Amino acid sequence: VDTKYADSPVYRVRWGAKELKDLGIMGAGLLGNPVGVGALQGAAALANKAGAKLLGKTLGPALLAADLAKNPWHVAKNRADKTGVILGDLLARTDAESYVLIGHSLGARVMAIAAEALGTKPGGPRIEDVHLLGAAIGAKGKWDGLVAGVDGAVYGYHSKNDNVLKLVYATAQAGQKAAGYSGFTPELTKLINVDVSDVVKSHSGYQNNV
């Protein structure tokens, strides 16, 4: 990032998600928190070795709890959604001419929603491009709002080797596929899927391959 955008300031967005502790190492993996990188790798390894059956037994009850208001995954997802709206509003208030948005996992979800929010602000900064890595967001949807305010394109990087999204996301979302696993559907002129399965071997594999 520093090399490609050498003359631009780089801002990093952080937000709290303490409820993910309830999910143990899987929760840390989904968040993509730098503090939880080791746990993230552990989550990917567990997903590889244990498979869907074990994940269903150990995580299913927590992820599919009847009380969604207290379900740690849904709380984290809702918090990411709110963060995206706030971020879009904050960017719209700045004097910058344009931004490039980059996010991983739930951070990609934040950036997708921020792009949608910023696109509704008349006279605000432009969005040059959006890069969504292993996005923890549903693969199918209406994406016109996502690309509406983007000058270049929204790139969705996905990997079939991402067992955290393949198994954990699908369990949490009652079988729904994640865009970070299978790509966005439908693909639009400004919404470009990029299959990186050949180089990204796990949910945490994006960090070393950006």
Image (spheres, rainbow, N blue to C red):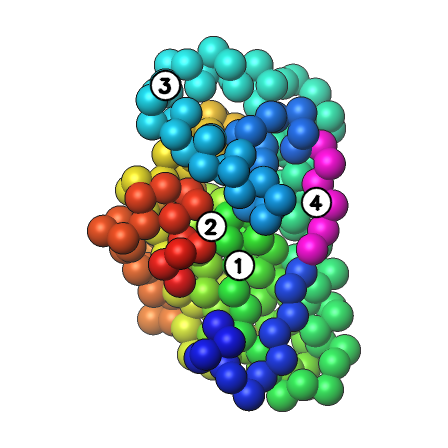
Say how many tags the image has. 4
Is residue 126 covered in magenta?
no
- The residue beneath circle 1 is 103
Real-space Cα distance between discs 3 and 2?
23 Å
Q: Nearer the viewer, residue 179 or 55?
A: 55
Residue that appears at 43% across and 50% down:
134
- Towards the viewer: 101 or 150: 101
Residue lying furthest front: 38
Rendered image: mark on residue 210: none
From where the camera sits, is residue 140 visible? no
Question: 10 Å neighbourhood of mark 4: few (<14), some, or many (≥20)?
Answer: some
Pinpoint residue 73: horizontal percent, then vertical percent.
61, 32
**What residue occupies the far top of the structure in this picture?**
57
- For the residues bearing labels 1 and 2, Cβ distance under 8 angstroms: yes
Type of the residue with mark 1: Gly
Q: Is residue 38 above or below residue 140?
A: above
Whether tag 1 and tag 3 are in contact, CB under 8 A, the answer is no
- Cα distance, mark 4 to mark 1? 15 Å
Query: Which residue is depicted at the point 46% across and 31% down?
Result: 42
Choose the circle earlier in sequence order: 2 or 4.
4
- Tag 1 or tag 4, which sits nearer the N-term? 4
Of the residues under marks 4 and 3, which one precedes in the sequence? 3
In the rendering, at what x and y percent does residue 126 appear?
58, 82
Give the foreground label among 4 and 1: 1
Image point 53% across, 30% down: which residue? 26
Q: Is residue 77 visible?
A: yes
Residue designated by label 2: 135
The region drawn magenta spans: 14-19
Determine crowd level at label 1: few under 14, some 14-19, many 20+ residues with C-alpha closer than 10 A: many
**Which residue has dot 4 on it?**
79
